[in-house]
Image (spheres, rainbow, N blue to C red):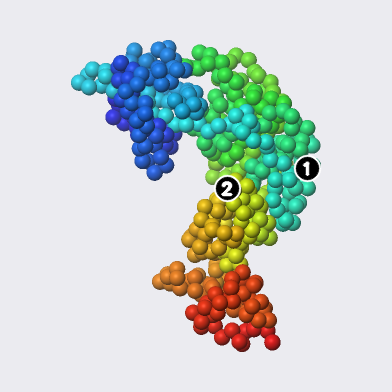
Amino acid sequence: MQINCLEKFTNSYGRIDAILIVNRDNIIEYSAMVTEDKEYLRTDDILGKNLFEVYPELNEENSTHARVMATGRPVLNQKQTLTEPSGRRHTTITSTFPIENDGKLIGSIDLSVELPEQGEHRAKRRALYTIEDIVSQSPDMAEIKKKLLKIAENGSPVMVIGESGAGKELIVEAIHSHGKRKKKPFISLNCAAIPDALIESTLFGTVKGSFTGAENKKGLFELADGGTLFLDEINSMSPELQAKLLKAAEEQQYMKIGAEQYTEVDVRLISAMNVDPETAIESGKIRRDLFYRLSVVQILVPPLRKRKEDIPLLISHFISVYNEKMGKSVQGISPFAEKVLRDYRWPGNVREMKNVMESAFNLVDGETIRLTDLPDHLISGSGMLGESSSPPDSDCSLAEMMNRYEKEILEKTLKSAASLNQAAAKLQITRQALKYKIQKLRIDYQKLLKE
């Protein structure tokens, strides 16, 4: 085995998702999945079994292991779709290297990276988003919705620009769902998820024999013919491939790898970026001519921190979603928890908020989401002392921060209440609990209550 094969594979793809070691008799000696933290989770259920019995799609002709055993040379970047013993099908890019002992070939090692599901598989999982799925009451988003319906009627290229998690995917799918192409395919590709070496064949397809292991295969352009092709994180694509994409976008034709003639298509291109376009152009992340071609129509999606009026609506939306998913009956959120969600800056935008609400549903008891149900990092990052307050001292403990925040809320509530009973009702706690908190925090409530 080449000593540096792990390093080479990781450098090419950025990660390794699975490792498989097979001996010269085709028996599996080792199998493991690799987590994001680079921990090896062994899959011992297939140890000692024959490779071709575990993976019936493989045979002596198409197996990279068999080819390595026959030639003694590595087989690199082979795309495979296999069925696990559990029944799950997945597509990987695999490189297989020989293992030698004292100059004798004793087996091989597979290193694989799993490709995300795309296009037609994704469309079968759920219906595409429509304009009704965009939960918002902000003026900026209302304008986008209005523009979206007009854009959907035509076929011009669209560029959607916004931070990760801000809702670009909803807008893209809604454009397709409300347009003339809605009954045609919607194919999606995250350009950052596919290695450069594979994006060209993924987009344009291949002709059998064009390289080792290549088959006649349609690319995403061909799969999307008549419909929409969505290219997310377009700025992650190499400049060389951007030039080929530009030609395909302008001429609506391209050449498959290994082909001798062009394939013509009718595809609406929608792309997305999560960085500032001018910065990306200046830094060489995206070609200026490609950007102009793909951004005939531009949609700028504001981050969640700039549309805080959407937060209460999103809270209600996710409560409904997770009540149904988890079989719970949460009715609302406490004033303390709501203030934290309102004041937090949401660097991960709506996607982060969705995850926070799901986390809260795993912890909530009863009908109300409370402060203790939220992740701790939200409290320290929410500006809980008010937007104009300066950050707490570095030696200020979480308990001290919580007390100062709770005192501020109680004082504001008491000022707007006519009695302790009314204040307790607004806070959704008992009068006794309110009295305890007042004493604990040394609040002179009689001066604060309305006369």
Q: Is residue 111 left or right of residue 23?
A: right
Label 2, residues with CA under 10 Å away: few <14, some 14-19, many ≥20: few
> Which circle, 1 or 2, is nearer the viewer?
2
State if disc 2 and disc 1 touch (CB < 8 Å).
no
> Whole-Å distance between the Cαs marked 1 and 2?
34 Å
- The x and y percentages for residue 308 are 65, 60
- The answer to whether residue 250 of the structure is visible from this angle is no
Looking at the picture, tell me which residue is in the foreground, 287 or 428: 428
Q: Is residue 335 visible?
A: yes
Q: x and y percent of residue 26 in the render? A: 33, 17
Instruction: Name the residue rendered at 60%, 24% in the picture.
Output: 219
Q: Residues within 10 Å of mark 1 (few under 14, many from 20)?
A: some
Quarter of the image with the C terminus in it: bottom right
Q: Look at the picture and state if 324 lies above or below 115.
A: below
**Which residue is label 2 attached to?**
326
Res. 35 mark? none
Asked whether 433 or 38 is in front, the reply is 433
At 35% across and 37% down in the image, what residue appears? Answer: 40
**Eyeballing the image, is 239 above or below 64?**
below
Q: Residue 282's image quarter? A: top right
Tell me the kind of residue under disc 1: Leu
- Mark 2 is on which residue type? Met
Q: Quick check: 290 left or right of 53?
A: right
The residue labelled by disc 1 is 149
The residue most toward the left is 102
Q: Which comes sooner in the sequence, label 1 or label 2?
A: 1
Estimate the x, y position of residue 276 in percent, counting from the top left: 60, 49
Q: Where 364 sits versus 202, above or below?
A: below
x and y, in percent, of residue 75 in the image: 39, 20
